[in-house]
């Protein structure tokens, strides 16, 4: 390879790496700082992909946009960095009464609110969505044009192989920085340094330096970026009351700008020092569980141990052995550092940093009490994280797994913070279906606790004086909330949408999808011209849509087998990219032509995946479970990757074909939301339809003798 060719290879590799690296960077940073983009989780991804696709379509355009990348990036960094002073963090177009959930947003505003007032409440959020979406699309279109210009220096399949290899490295690089809990300013420092290879002109370099400088300037001291959250802490001091001095109560832990948990001192000594007025500000509800079930020596499993409040309460009430499970290592470290009672240092406590469902499936012990504690991540499901942490925690299958860990006289406790009546009903019905008996529910001012199991003394609990969960009362409340008792279905591994009232597309999500699909449609037609209606172009479009749909489904379902953690997600995505790369190399070596047989095998593998419930594999040992589950989930990618490699190897206009493929992923990402109605496994059927469309247009291209006609006519021979 001569020096010039090597330079072209390195340039394509680097620009591809930069593209995916900044895609991951912007998606995570934006969703943490402007939380409406965490609620519409796929919108940032779609904006990046949409922009890259448009840029690839403009590779040969007479007007060069690629040089504007640093300025677009600077604009994005400025908006994200100053989101808090600009009051963009909590801007929303959803019902404020259901801020943490995926429920119906329209028509449920509290109080006497007029139609115009409702419109006025959602307009700021919609405006932010539109403006930032367009800005992201433009910025990544500039980068996409640069990618297309380097892409065209190679035959399509070798160029795509370099692109995929670089993307794989980009994922590993960003995952490594996340693992080290580095901050956005460090992410930008690495990314902008890589960009200087292409954007070294004075103004461009200055814009890149400004991106990093702004991030450093606006960085808040003490903020920690865990692999999941933006985390900060602040001391909690209760004001003095007469002769009672100020009470140092602990620390509040703020996650993505919300104080959803803390490390509080509820020890008897501290409570004894507080005045009656000061006691009203103490969060003593962590002890309510033991008021219901009594104090005695017991072994425990605490799911979502957080900063340690549930552990401290358990130790105060006689727990002798506790397995504490928490998914975020940073939260555990903060608990060890900040909690006044130091529960994590107690030799009775064993810490497990893991996903709850993965732990439940692996655990062989049994406990006196299995405690679904204040799972702080249940708020992250909707608006606080770019990873859906607890999709599979509050499901029928999850509660059944937990029930198997109870001793013959054990108890399972599920504590949940509901904001609507129908959420209470869903948890009640899910536990009932899972265990075959109705739990007894207790309402406090702070949460709802359900107790079930052979060790529950229902009559004793009823005498405690707590307000009990009443089915008849809930039926009336649900009717008022327009979600009748019968229409509220339990959550399952196939339909795990805890915060969705029923199988439907909510107004806010429907509006988001319409906005995403329709926006820029005319731009797409203008950028790709005749290639947009070319059967080969449509083949690439449908291949991209189907592949993206399979990818998001597989990443989600892999959580059932290995845990829904950031590292599992990274490994799954990296493995998919590796399969693509291997398929490309095989095609370059063997020059395969028969796609018909591969489409047939793909159909069979998707049907096998559809009819195989992954939760049924949880009874198997860990090695067998992961092996069989990975085969079921990954086999379709083997055939899909080979189909794409063969198809892509025969196109002449490589950058346009890749651009159409990326735009297809935009459609696939949007179609993922159909799982809200159909369930997750049904996405296999949607993928089959998309691949059928791809095959139809492939055959049509063959018959019409369009692009690469001689090779197309040899296909399947």
Image (cartoon, rainbow, N blue to C red):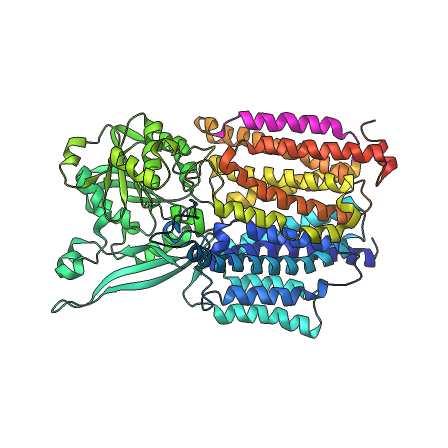
Instruction: Classify residue 639 by image quadrant.
Output: top right
Is residue 610 inside the magenta stretch? Answer: yes
Q: Is residue 222 visible?
A: yes
Could you tell me what secondary structure mostly forms the magenta stretch? helix
Identify the residue at horizontal 57%, vertical 29% (top origin): 632
Identify the residue at horizontal 51%, vertical 46% (top origin): 509
Q: In the displayed orientation, state which residue is furthest to the left.
A: 243
Q: Is residue 532 left or right of residue 517?
A: right
In this rendered view, identify the residue nearer to me: 51 or 654: 51
Instruction: Report the magenta residues as a range.
Output: 590-614
Q: Is residue 391 above or below residue 632?
A: below
Q: Where the C terminus falls, by quadrant?
A: top right
Q: Is residue 318 visible?
A: no
Is residue 267 inside the magenta stretch? Answer: no
Place of residue 375 in the rendered image (x, y in percent of width and height, measured from the top left): 35, 45
Identify the residue at horizontal 72%, vertical 62% (top origin): 66
Identify the residue at horizontal 46%, vertical 29% (top origin): 615
In this rendered view, identify the residue nearer to me: 216 or 606: 606
Place of residue 622 in the rendered image (x, y in percent of width and height, measured from the top left): 47, 31
Q: Is residue 538 left or right of residue 637?
A: right
């Amino acid at each position: 390879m001569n020096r010039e060719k090597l330079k072209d290879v390195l340039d394509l590799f680097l620009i591809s790496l930069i593209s995916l690296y900044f895609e991951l960077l912007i998606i995570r940073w934006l969703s943490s700082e402007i939380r409406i983009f965490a609620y519409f989780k796929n919108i940032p991804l779609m904006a990046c992909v949409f922009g890259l696709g448009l840029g690839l379509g403009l590779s040969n355009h007479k007007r060069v946009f690629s040089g504007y990348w640093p300025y677009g990036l600077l604009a994005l960094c400025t908006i994200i960095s100053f989101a808090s002073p600009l009051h963009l963090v909590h801007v929303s177009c959803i019902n404020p009464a259901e801020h943490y959930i995926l429920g119906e947003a329209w028509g449920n505003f509290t109080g006497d609110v007029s139609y115009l007032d409702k419109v006025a409440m959602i307009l700021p959020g919609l405006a932010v969505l539109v403006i930032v979406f367009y800005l992201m699309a433009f910025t990544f279109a500039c980068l996409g044009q640069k990618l297309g210009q380097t892409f065209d220096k190679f035959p399509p399949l070798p160029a795509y192989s370099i692109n995929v290899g670089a993307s794989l490295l980009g994922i590993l690089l960003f995952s490594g920085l996340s693992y080290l809990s580095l901050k956005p300013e460090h992410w930008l420092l690495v990314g902008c340094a890589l960009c200087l290879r292409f954007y070294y002109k004075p103004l461009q370099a200055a814009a890149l330096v400004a991106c990093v400088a702004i991030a450093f300037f606006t960085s808040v001291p003490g903020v920690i970026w865990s692999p999941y959250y933006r985390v900060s802490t602040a001391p909690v001091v209760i004001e003095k009351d007469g002769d009672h001095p100020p009470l140092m109560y602990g620390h509040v832990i703020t996650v993505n700008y919300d104080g959803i948990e803390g490390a509080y001192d509820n020890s008897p000594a501290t409570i004894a020092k507080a005045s009656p007025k000061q006691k009203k500000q103490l969060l003593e509800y962590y002890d309510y569980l033991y008021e219901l079930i009594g104090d005695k020596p017991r072994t425990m499993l605490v799911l979502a141990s957080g900063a340690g409040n549930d552990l401290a309460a358990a130790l105060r009430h006689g727990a002798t052995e506790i397995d504490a499970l928490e998914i975020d290592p940073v939260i555990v470290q903060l608990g060890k550092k900040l909690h006044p009672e130091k529960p994590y240092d107690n030799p009775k406590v064993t810490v497990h940093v893991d996903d709850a469902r993965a732990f439940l499936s692996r655990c062989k012990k049994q406990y006196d009490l299995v405690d679904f504690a204040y799972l702080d991540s249940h708020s992250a499901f909707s608006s606080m994280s770019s990873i859906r942490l607890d999709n599979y925690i509050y499901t029928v299958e999850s509660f059944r797994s937990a029930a198997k860990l109870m001793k013959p006289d054990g108890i399972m406790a599920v504590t949940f913070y509901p904001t609507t009546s129908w959420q209470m009903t869903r948890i009640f019905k899910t536990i009932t279906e899972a265990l075959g008996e109705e739990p007894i529910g207790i309402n406090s001012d702070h949460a709802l606790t359900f107790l079930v199991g052979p060790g529950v003394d229902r009559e004793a609990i009823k005498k405690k004086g707590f307000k009990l969960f009443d089915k008849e009362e809930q039926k009336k409340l649900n009717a008022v909330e327009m979600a009748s008792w019968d229409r509220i279905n339990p959550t399952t591994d196939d339909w795990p949408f805890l915060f969705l009232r029923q199988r439907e597309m909510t107004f806010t999500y429907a509006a988001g999808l319409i906005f995403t699909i329709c926006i820029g449609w005319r731009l797409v037609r203008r950028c790709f011209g005749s290639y947009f209606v070319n059967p080969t172009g449509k083949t690439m479009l449908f291949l991209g849509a189907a592949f993206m749909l399979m990818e998001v489904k597989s990443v989600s379902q892999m959580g059932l087998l290995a845990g829904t953690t950031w590292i599992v997600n990274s490994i799954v995505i990296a493995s998919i990219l590796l399969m693509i790369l291997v398929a490309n190399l095989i095609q370059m070596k063997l020059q395969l032509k028969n796609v018909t047989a591969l489409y047939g095998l793909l159909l069979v593998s998707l049907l096998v995946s559809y009819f195989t419930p992954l939760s049924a594999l949880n009874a198997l040992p860990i090695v067998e479970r992961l092996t069989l589950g990975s085969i079921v989930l990954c086999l379709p990618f083997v055939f899909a990757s080979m189909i794409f490699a063969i198809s892509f190897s025969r196109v002449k206009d490589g950058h346009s074909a890749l651009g159409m493929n990326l735009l297809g992923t935009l459609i696939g990402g949007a179609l993922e939301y159909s799982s809200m109605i159909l369930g997750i496994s049904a996405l296999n059927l949607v993928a089959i339809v998309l691949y059928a469309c791809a095959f139809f247009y492939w055959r049509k291209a063959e018959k019409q003798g369009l692009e690469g006609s001689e090779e197309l006519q040899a296909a399947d021979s």
